[in-house]
Image: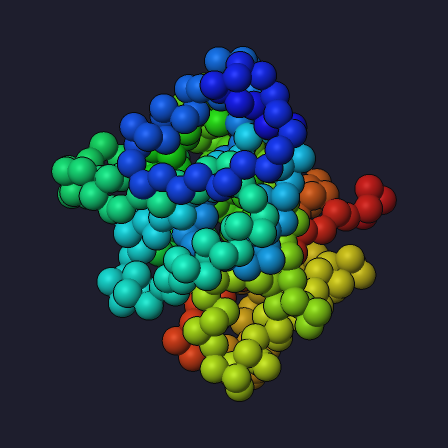
Amino acid sequence: MRYNAAEQGYVSEKLTMLIVTDIESLRERLRAWRRPGTRIALVPTMGNLHAGHTSLIEHARASAERVVVSIFVNPMQFDRPEDLAAYPRTLEEDRCRLRDIDPDVVFIPAAETVYPRGMDGVTRVEVPHLSSIIEGASRPGHFIGVATVVAKLFNMVQPDVAIFGEKDYQQLLVIRRLVTDLDLPIDIVGLPTVREPDGLALSSRNRNLSPTERAQAPGLYAELRRFADRIHSGELDYASLEEQMMHNLKKCRFRPDYVSVRRAGDLAVPDGSDRELVILAAAWLGRTRLIDNVRLTLMNDR
């Protein structure tokens, strides 16, 4: 059932997906839906959509009466110009995929719409500490770009719920802290990583892998699983395990950036009492940088 603003009621017929590119048109449509108290979900994306995005949108559809999907390659979160230039842009393919999923609105703003006065002087949002460790240490300024654009999208859409994937685990925690610290009335939902049958986490960057690299890429997840299995078996010298995984990745022709065991709730360095952990890793394969993680729960008798 969908709300029809003109009729002031719900109708069952399928409506055409609406594509908007400007903020005022987006807000006008959302105002019409918000009057009757309709629950609105937001799924922020950078396009080049895949089955992982599909799962996020389907969950959003089950969580709210209206679903907004944004497609915006955010230049502020890229620490290297060449990385921004190489990011896959497949807008026509994305539109075709979205027609099958049927969100209510697809918001596709230009950079000038999101940053009308440019990025140099724009007000920025920073989540301290969480933004400067692990991935943030490898990509200075990245999470400031993420937090700023997400805060802007939240203000544009004012959703009741926003859906993110757990592949970008640190990003998910940054956004949760942002919402908590700024008292935003938004439920943040994180969904498990969607993977290929061989274990490779679905990512827009995967299309940049050569055939040979694609065959090697599942090795990152395989090493993470081996790392987790060793912890489960009682090996708790995390620093030594991190070093060994870095070595194994190099043997598999990766160029590892980091491997880190952290407390799952806040990414603090774990001590002997912590039971909920996450292993995070980033590694280059050719010109493509892959990230992944594995969650694990230790038994209480350790």
Q: Is residue 110 above or below residue 257?
A: above
Task: Work out whether residue 247 or residue 156 is closer to the camera in this orientation and state it.
Answer: 156
Q: Residue at x 58, y 16 (%)?
A: 9
Instruction: Tell me where residue 302 appears, x and y as whole percent.
Output: 81, 48
Q: Which residue reaches farthest bottom?
A: 212
Q: Along the horizontal axis of the image, is 236 left or right of 217?
A: right
* Closer to us: 289 or 214: 214
Picture quadrant where residue 191 is located? top right
Q: Residue furthest right?
A: 301
Q: Is residue 4 left or right of residue 30?
A: right
Query: Residue 130: x, y in percent?
Result: 44, 41
Residue at x-position 62% and y-position 73%: 218
Residue 259 appears at what percent x and percent y?
53, 62
Q: Is residue 245 visible?
A: no
Q: Residue at x 67, y 35 (%)?
A: 62
Q: As rendered, which of 285 and 203 lies closer to the eye?
A: 203
Colouring used for the render: rainbow
The percent position of residue 136, horizontal first and vertical second, equals: 39, 50
Q: Quadrant of residue 89?
A: bottom left
- Quadrant containing the N terminus is top right
Q: Is residue 122 left or right of residue 262?
A: left
The correct choice, above or below, for 148 with respect to 302 in the image is above
Res 112 visible: yes
